[in-house]
Amino acid sequence: MKIGIIGAGNIGSALAHRFRAAGHDVAIANSRGPQTLTQLAKETGARAVPVEDAVRGNDIVVVAIPEGRVKDLPPKLFAGAPKELIVIDTGNYYPQQRDGRIDGIEEGLPESRWVEQEIGHPVVKAFNTIIAPSLLAEGKPAGAPGRIAVPVAADDARAKAVVMRLIDEIGFDPIDDGTIDESWRQQPGSPVYIKKFGADATRRALREARKTRDPAWRATSGSPSARAR
């Protein structure tokens, strides 16, 4: 498949490595321009491109940027994207640590529902519960003991199935987490967040999740750049 990645931080870079190792055609972009991604492109075999080219002509686009930077994406970036384009949101909302206040999320929207409203395109929530070193080094063949599970939420059954196959291909057990409105079960503070659980433990953790956001994951007056987004 042709995969574009927006964001070359820890998760974006790790996914570039994993997808290229699986034989996919990968383009990666960041906010500073392709000239700053020369080393990563050399290491992974991914193509460094402008942000617009991470979307144009690809089968899948991964948005792997801080939640607070979603509004900084180029206007109408996804406006001309075909309906069948699959967009994966890997983000997490860190209001106290990084992102400041995002009103829609504070008012109860699941993080990925807010993201898809901002970009104007449906998303699949995945890769937000696993840390980058695990993505890079802990993938295992299907059926291997200790294989880490990755929950996936989406409204579109076809898009979800494609992403789940991709997760399995790079060495992890994909777990269906329902729709985007149910994706709060895998947000920061949930029982499954950044845990190296297998499939059964992940399903159990998703069932045990509670929708009320813990105060540790809500904005405060001391949040960085605490402004409405």
Image (cartoon, rainbow, N blue to C red):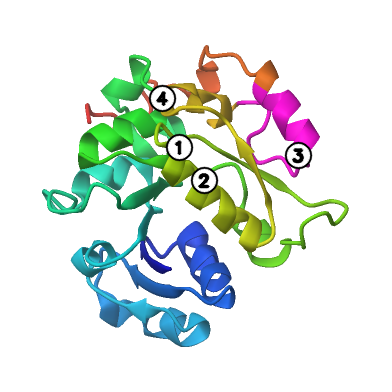
Residue kind at label 1, given as amino acid type: Ala
Residue 91 seen in this snapshot: no
**Residue 164 lies within the magenta run:** no
For marks 4 and 1, give the one nearer the viewer: 1
Tell me the residue that label 1 is attached to.
Answer: 157
Residue at the extreme bottom of the image, as rendered: 42
> Pointer 1 and pointer 2: residues touching (CB < 8 Å)?
yes
Tell me the residue that label 3 is attached to.
Answer: 199
Q: Which comes sooner in the sequence, label 4 or label 1?
A: 4
Closer-to-camera residue (81/209): 81
Residue 114, quarter of the rendered image: top left
| Vertical arrangement, residue 38 with respect to residue 117, above or below | below
Which residue lies at the image location 13% right of the left edge and 48% below the top edge? 79
Residue kind at label 2, given as amino acid type: Ala
Label 2: few (<14), some (14–19) or many (≥20) C-alpha neighbours in 10 Å: some
CA separation in Å, label 4 and label 3: 23 Å
Q: Which residues are magenta?
A: 190-206
**Residue 203 lies within the magenta run:** yes
Residue kind at label 3, given as amino acid type: Ala
Closer-to-camera residue (151/217): 151
> Pointer 4 and pointer 3: residues touching (CB < 8 Å)?
no
Q: In the figure, is residue 157 to the left or right of 227?
A: right
Q: Which comes sooner in the sequence, label 3 or label 2?
A: 2
Residue 101 seen in this snapshot: yes
Tag shown at residue 161:
2
CA separation in Å, label 4 and label 2: 21 Å
Residue at the extreme front of the image, as rendered: 158
